[in-house]
Image (cartoon, helix red, strand yellow):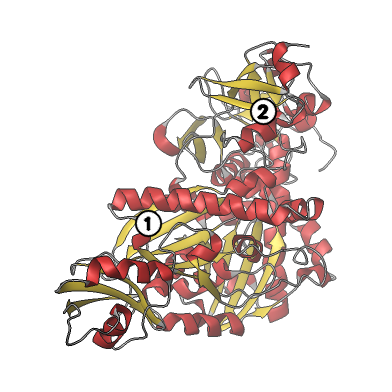
Amino acid sequence: MSKREGRGKAEITLVPDGAVVRGAIGASILRVLQECNVQIESSCGGNGTCGRCRIRFLTRPPEPTAHDLAQIDSADIARGWRLACAHTLRGDIRIEVASTTGELDQKATETPAPPVGELNPPVRLRAVRWTAPSREDPRPLATRLAVAVDACPPRFPPTLARLPGILRSDGTISVIEQADGILDVRPGEDAKVCGLAIDVGTTTLALHLVDLASGRTLGRAAARNPQRRFGADVISRIAHVRRTPADGVPDLHAAVVDGLNALAATLAKTAKITPEEIYHATVVGNPTMLHLLLGIDPRGIDVAPYAPVFTARTSCRASDLGLRLHPCALVETLPGVSAYVGADIVGGLLETALDRRPGRSLYLDIGTNGEIVLALDGHLIACSTAAGPAFEGASIVQGMAALHGAIESVSIGDGRITCDVIGKTAARGMCGTGLLSAVAELRAVGAIDPSGRFAASNQHLSDRFDGEGATRRFRLTDGAEPVYLYQSDVREFQLAKAAIRTGIETLLRRAHVDAERLDAVLIGGAFSAGLSRRHLPATGLVPTLDPDRIELVGDAAGRGAVRVLLDARLAEAVDRLAETVEYVELSGDREFSDLFVKHIPFPPGPADRSPASIDESRTPTDGRA
C-alpha cells in the first residue's frame, strides 16, 4: 500500500490545465470529479450505459471493464480512454477529461421579442424627495417612508437594515416597491431595477436579464443544467430521489440553484449591476424541474396516476431557494397543465398566442420529452410523449449538447458533404439538429433506406461507410478525429421521431383533423434554432406538408417568461391560459403502440424511386429493422 493510500486520499491531476482535486481511495472517479465541480458529462447517472464520462489515463490505465469495452472503441481503449463511472480511485492519477466546454448558443444568443404595449412590471422604481427626521417629526424611518410613498412599510430585515445609512439626511432616494409593499431603498434616483426570466430545462438553463424600467434586455446566458450528473432525463432524476430519499431532492435542488447563481452572477457582472439589483424572477420549466428548483419531492410524477404536487403558479422569495438575487426578490413560476406539460409550454403558448390563432395549428417543443399542443380555432389540446434523449444529443455515439464543436446541420450535394459546426471550429460531435439533418440528407440521396438501414449510395459516398450491423457507420467529417453517424444513431432517431409523430397523430385523430388541413406547425425550444424546415416532413417527424407552413419559433418559452416579467397583468392571463388546455394522457391510448410502430420507418422519398440508388447486396441488417 502506498503512503497516500494509507492516508485514505489520492490526487487527480487534470491535464492540460494542471488543476488538482482530491478524493477518497475507493470512491468512484466520476463522483470525485463531480463533487469537485469538474465539468464532465454523465447522462445515465453513472450507470455505465451512456458512455459520456470518458477520461484518458495519462498514468497507467486500469484494465478496461465490460462497460468500457461496450462504450469505447478498441483504438481509444488502447490510448487509455476509460469511463470515469466504471473505475474507482486507487492512487494518484493524471487524466484528461473529454472536452465539454463551449457556449450554448441556441438559448443564449436568441433575442426576445420586444414587449408589446405599455410596460407594467410588478416591481417599480419611484424617485422620492426625502426629508430626514427632526425634533418636530421624530417618527421611525420605516413609518416615515411608508407615508412618503403611500405604501405598506418595508417588512423585511434586509431593507430595514439599509434604512439608517440612507434616510438620516435629506435628499432624493429610490424606492423599489411591489404591490405588497416596499422591497428596497437605494440612495439617489438612478437605481437599477432588474428582473430575470429563467428557463429551467432538463438539459439547459437559460436566463434573460431585463431592465424592468425600460424593458430592455441587458444580457442572456445559458449553461448545461448541472443536474445532468444525476441523469439525462426527468425519469432518471426522479429515480435518484427514489434511490437516495434523504439526499436526493437536496442534491438536485442544490445543483440547479448553483447553476442559476453562476449564470446570474455572470450576467450581473456583464451588465455592471449587482445580483442584489435583481428584484423579480419568472420561471418556466417542466413540472419535474420546477419541483426540484423549489425543493419539492417529484415522486409521483413518474408513476400512474402521474400526479404532481402542484401545477398552479407559485411564488416565494429568492432567499427561500438560496438564489443569490435581492433576498426579497419574488420568484414566480408560471403555471403548468399536467405532470408532463409544464410552464415552459404555457410560456410558449403565451408567446405564440396559439389560443388566438384562427384555423388549425400545432405547437411542438422537441426535447427529451416532446410536448405537443393542437389548436383548433382557439381550443387547445395537449399531450406529452417520451422521445428519449436523442434530440438533446444524448444516446448518440458521438452526440453532444449544442456546444462549440457540435455539428448542427449537414448538406449533401454533388457527392460532397458540408457540415455547419457551432463556433465555426473543428467538429467533435453532433447535437440533435445535426442528427436530424444528417439523417434527412442521407435519406434524400438513398444512403438510408425507408426501413432505416444504411445502404450503399452513389460512388462518391460509398467509401465513407465502414463496419457491419449496428456498428456500421458513415463518416461525416474527415481529419484526425472524424465524426461518424452510426447505424445505431439512425435507430435512436427513428424511435424518437416515431414517438413525436405518434403524439401528433393521436391528437389529430381525437380532433378528427386531417394532417394536410393543418394551417401551421410551430416548432419551439432550442432544438428549432438550427433546423431546416424541409427536413422535418422528409424524415416523418411531422406530417407531410408544405415546409412554408412550418414556423421555427425558437425559445418561445423564455420569451413568454420575459413578457410576464414585464407585465403584471399577464400573470392572471397565463393562469387562465393554462386552465383552458385540455390534456390527453397517451399511456391509456389503445392505438399508441400500433401508431408508434407505423411511424418508425421513413416516409417514401425521391431516392426510393431510383433502384440504382440503393444496393441491397451491401445493405447490412442490425436485427431491429
Q: In this view, does 175 lie to the left or right of 182?
A: left
Q: Which amino acid does label 2 sit on?
A: Gly
Q: Which of 105 and 195 is in front in this view?
A: 195
User: Do labels 1 and 2 touch, CB within 8 Å?
Assistant: no
Q: Position of residue 591 (x, y in %)?
A: 82, 69
Please report the residue visible at 43 percent of the width from the left and 68 percent of the height from the top. Answer: 329
Q: Where is residue 579 in the image (x, y as percent from the top left)?
A: 60, 84
Please report the residue visible at 51 percent of the width from the left and 80 percent of the height from the top. Answer: 574
Q: Is mark 2 on a helix, strand or loop?
A: strand
First-in-chain label (1 vs 2): 2
Tell me the quarter of the image containing the N terminus.
top right
Q: Which of 45 and 466 is in front in this view?
A: 45
Q: In this view, does 596 lie to the left or right of 116?
A: right
Relative to 405, does residue 91 appear above or below in the rendering? above
The quadrant where residue 299 appears = bottom right
Relative to 184, does residue 253 appear above or below in the rendering? above
Q: Which amino acid does label 1 sit on?
A: Pro
Tell me the quarter of the image containing the C terminus.
top right
Q: Which residue lies furthest to the front in this view?
A: 135
Crowding at label 2, few (<14), some or many (≥20) Cα neighbours within 10 Å? Answer: many
Q: Which of 399 and 252 is in front in this view?
A: 252
Determine which residue is flagged by label 2: 23
Q: What element carries label 1?
A: helix
Relative to 237, does residue 484 appear above or below in the rendering? above
Determine which residue is flagged by label 1: 275
